[in-house]
Image (cartoon, rainbow, N blue to C red):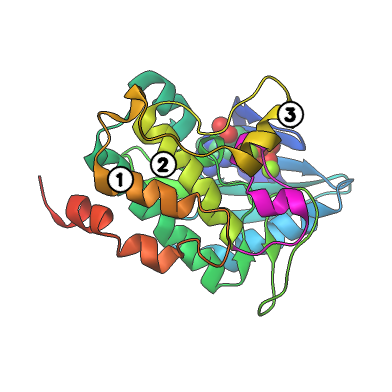
Amino acid sequence: NKIEDDYISGATLGKGKFGSVWLCRSRVTGVEFACKTLGKGEETVHREVEIMQHLSGHPGVVTLEAVYEDSECFHLVMELCSGGRLIDQMSKVGPYSEHRAANILKELMLVIKYCHDMGVVHRDVKPENILLTISGKIKLADFGLAMRVANGQKLTGLAGSPAYVAPEVLLGNYSEKVDIWSAGVLLHALLVGVLPFQGDSLEAVFEAIKTVKLDFHTGIWESVSKPARDLIQRMLTRDVGARITADEVLSHPWILFYTERTL
Ligand code: ADP
Ligand code: MG
Ligand code: MG
């Protein structure tokens, strides 16, 4: 079957480096999906498809409905996330309440833990790649940089987005802990409203990632509680061995406080 036989294509949902994402509608059921078209030129394309198939089934991962292949492209028919991207919500909402941020982080850590348990490192955790359902639940998307890792195997090679990249990625060898760092950068952005490591050039951003200490004495931290600051600091720990794990994030007092309580 060709994709055109089964789906009617609609508006563009997003444009990325390696392809485009379109709205599409099943000719049979009328249900809407998102279709990501990836050129076969990229060696990583097979990996993206394979990893999405491997991970589909967790509520926090964008589900793959079908895959079509023609001579030039793969077409990934995915569950449609009608709530858009977390990054767009962040720029509208500004800093999040601790209650909302803790619930987003908990959902994200559950899916990151699932990926790690399944032997996958995402490597591109950032709010551009976190999508929202219509009811506001988060879905981790874009497994284009994700890698399967065997037990304890180390990864190499620069991957990810500058502001979210973990310091050990810049130095060479790294593990699944890079996803915890990136989620820590996101938590900082959610609570404080700005990224923790900034600079006028790529080099300056990387230098900040390798050296800058979070300064909890500045005014921007006034509204952020002690336990939240503690968690950010534990996630943005440069020593990989000392950095908090996904399980430990999930049982951190700040997460428990805001996610066990029903408001
Ligand atoms: P890239 O690898 O090019 O960054 P992504 O997988 O991140 O591609 O998708 C690019 C954009 O397309 C996303 O940021 C989002 O706006 C949109 N998009 C991707 N998947 C979906 C989906 N399942 N539902 C709705 N929009 C999506
Ligand atoms: Mg992306
Ligand atoms: Mg990608």
How far apart are the alpha carbons under marks 2 and 1? Answer: 9 Å
Q: Earlier in the sequence, mark 2 or mark 3?
A: 2
Q: Nearer the viewer, residue 5 or 126?
A: 126
What residue is pinned by disc 2? 187
| Residue type highlighted by circle 2 | Leu
Give ligand 3's quarter of the image. Answer: top right
**Which portion, as a residue range, is magenta?**
159-176
For marks 3 and 1 on the same chain, the one whose residue lies earlier in the sequence: 3
Q: Residues within 10 Å of mark 3 (few under 14, many from 20)?
A: few
Tell me the residue at 67%/56% (across/down): 146
| Inter-mark Cα distance, 3 to 1 | 28 Å
Residue at which label 3 appears: 202
Quadrant of the rendered structure where residue 35 is? top right
- Helix or strand or loop: what does disc 2 sit on? helix
Check mark 2 vs ligand 2: CB closer than 8 Å? yes or no. Answer: no
Query: Total marks drawn?
Result: 3
> Residue at point 63% right, 49% down?
166
Q: Quadrant of the C terminus?
A: top left
Figure check: 107 above or below 195: below
Does the magenta-highlighted stretch encompass residue 252?
Answer: no
In the rendered image, the residue lying farthest to the bottom is 151
Residue at image point 56% right, 72% down: 118
The Cα–Cα distance between marks 2 and 3, rounded to whole angstroms, is 22 Å
Residue for badge 1: 228
Q: Is residue 238 left or right of residue 158?
A: left
